[in-house]
Amino acid sequence: MLTNKEIKQLIWEKADNVASKLGLEIFDILIKGSNKNKILEVVIDKADGYVSIGDCERFSKAFDPWLDEIDLFDKSYELVVSSPGLDRKLRGKADYERFKGKLAKFILKGKETKHPVVIGYIDEILEDQIKITEKDSGKLFNIDLNEIDKANLEIEL
């Protein structure tokens, strides 16, 4: 019997192969639920835009037969294919570059930080810093990349 980590790795490899053939990429894979009600969530992404319902459907139709054939789970499972969402997690320098000019929320490490949360527009990405223009004040922040605990896009209304 494979561990969840091994199952996830196996799924990631196959999902990545299927996704690349469809012009998509894998953002995350989550295995949730109990043994009786297992949920496999595959989060897909698109480098040149946003993921549509059609993208999720195409991926699901291409990927599901392999899952049924390989039979990784003891009991039945539910496959959920989704996008990272409009408020997607930003996972590092490549994402900051990709979403340059977009509104994002940065939660910084350390309790002594003068501004533990910065919401602003991604202006520039340097070697070890990111420049953010705060949404409300217009103040420019230079944030060390290693000081970012979490970051995600913010939905602009």
Image: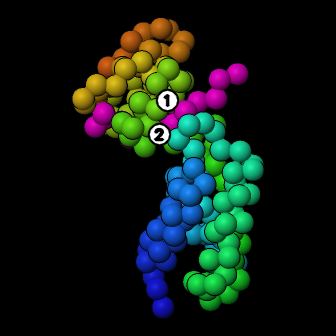
Position above or below: 105 against 29:
above
Q: Residue furthest left?
A: 127
Q: Residue 152, image x and y in percent?
A: 51, 36
Display coloring: rainbow
Residue 32 placement, left or right of 157: left
Kind of residue at disc 2: Leu
The residue at the point 55 percent across, 33 percent down is 153
**Quadrant in which the C terminus is drawn:** top right
Q: Nearer the viewer, residue 30 or 63?
A: 63
What segment carries the magenta color? 145-157
Q: Nearer the viewer, residue 78 or 58?
A: 58
Kind of residue at disc 1: Phe
Asked if one can make out residue 22 in the rendered structure from this viewpoint, the answer is yes
Q: Residue 112, image x and y in percent?
A: 31, 30
2 and 1 marks in contact (CB < 8 Å):
yes
Position above or below: 82 against 104:
below
Name which quarter of the figure residue 59 lies in. Answer: bottom right
The residue at the point 39 percent across, 12 percent down is 140
| Magenta region includes residue 153 | yes
What is the spatial separation of the Cα atoms under label 2 and label 1, in whole angstroms? 9 Å
Q: Residues within 10 Å of mark 2 (few under 14, many from 20)?
A: some
Q: Secondary structure at mark 2?
A: loop
Name which quarter of the figure residue 109 lies in. Answer: top left
The residue at the point 60 percent across, 61 percent down is 42
Q: Secondary structure at mark 1?
A: loop
Position above or below: 9 against 97:
below
**Residue bearing the label numbered 2:** 90
Q: Nearer the viewer, residue 5 or 34?
A: 5
Q: Residue 139, image x and y in percent?
A: 42, 9
Q: Nearer the viewer, mark 2 or mark 1?
A: 1
Asked if one can make out residue 34 in the rendered structure from this viewpoint, the answer is no
**Residue bearing the label numbered 1:** 99
